[in-house]
Amino acid sequence: MELATNTGDWVLDSFAGSGTTGAVAHKMGRRWIMVELGEHCHTHIIPRLKKVIDGEDQGGISKAVNWKGGGGFRYYRLGPSLIVNDAWGNPVINSEFNAAMLAEAVCKLEGFTFAPDADIYWQQGRSSETDFIYVTTQMMTKEMLAKLSDDVGPKRSLLVCCGAFKGDVGQFENLTVKKIPKAVLQKCEWGHDDYSLAIENLPMRIEEVVPQDTGREATKSGRGGGKKARDEGPTLFDLEGLE
């Protein structure tokens, strides 16, 4: 951990086991993400990290870093796939998702903040003060879309994600209409309950050429020049501006 990271860096352990990586990273001032498929989260990892945070875990590197406790963590359970194949191999919305789960999932995938309005049924999320999203499994008819368009008005816009729709949706200038399966198929892995995700190879770093008069050979940018030398390029967690 000391050789590869600095204080404040992110540490990822996608096979967390008993949670040792997170415990050590936490005590050393690193931020961390751990993933585990089995019941280890409940039987080993969460109890262990609670002791780390409370200062009760004084094993390992605790004395070396004078660990007294502190910090915290969030725990998430991976939800079922939003899209599954039906009996004929067609992508459909998973029946395990209720209306609220579906709306929240689609808001996340479409870049909206999930914020359902208590009074206006079609305001389930927003991306700005005038741009909203409405998620439904219904088939939207021309009449239903016309009513929505009237409610939204000329000064607001609405993204409608539905199970299906009929009619020419282009006639409604303040509405954008998408069929849910098609809208999300390219935005997430689906149909998997294991680790068989599509992993892309990262591009190689461009070699940094040192001027000839120094007498040194060309070296790759990165960790040359000392144990703590760091790459100045974007990292996995530099997500600003990426989709």
Image (cartoon, rainbow, N blue to C red):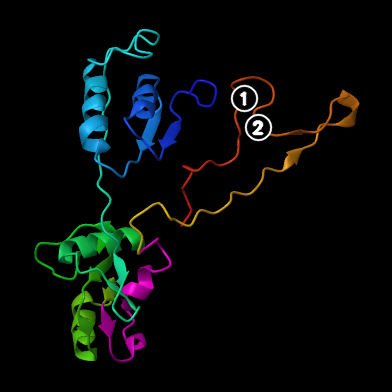
What residue is at 23 percent from the left and 77 percent from the top? 153
- Percent x, y for residue 74? 25, 37
133 up-or-down from 221: above or below: below
In the rendered image, which quarter is residue 99 located in?
bottom left
| Rendered residue at 10%/62% (across/down) | 118
Q: Which mark is residue 222?
A: 2
Left or right position of 135 against 196: left
Q: Position of residue 224 (x, y in %)?
A: 69, 26
Q: Is residue 201 left or right of residue 126?
A: right
Q: Position of residue 58 (x, y in %)?
A: 29, 12
Residue type, label 1 = Ala
**Along the viewing direction, whichever of 18 and 103 lies nearer the viewer:** 18
* Cβ atoms under marks 2 and 1 closer than 8 Å: yes
The label shown at residue 164 is none
Residue at 22% over, 15% down:
56
User: Which residues fall within the magenta stretch?
Assistant: 163-190
Q: Residue at x 39, y 11 (%)?
A: 65
In this rendered view, identify the residue nearer to me: 232 or 82. Answer: 82
| Residue type indicated by callout 2 | Gly
- Few, some or many C-alpha atoms within 10 Å of disc 1 (few <14, some 14-19, many ≥20)? few
Is residue 10 in sight in this rendering? yes
* Residue 40, placed above or below residue 88: above
Of the two numbered discs 2 and 1 on the same chain, state the one appearing first in sequence.
Answer: 2
Q: Quadrant of residue 139?
A: bottom left
**Residue 76, position as x, y percentages in the image:** 25, 44
The residue to which callout 1 is attached is 229
Compute the Cα span from label 2 to label 1. Answer: 7 Å
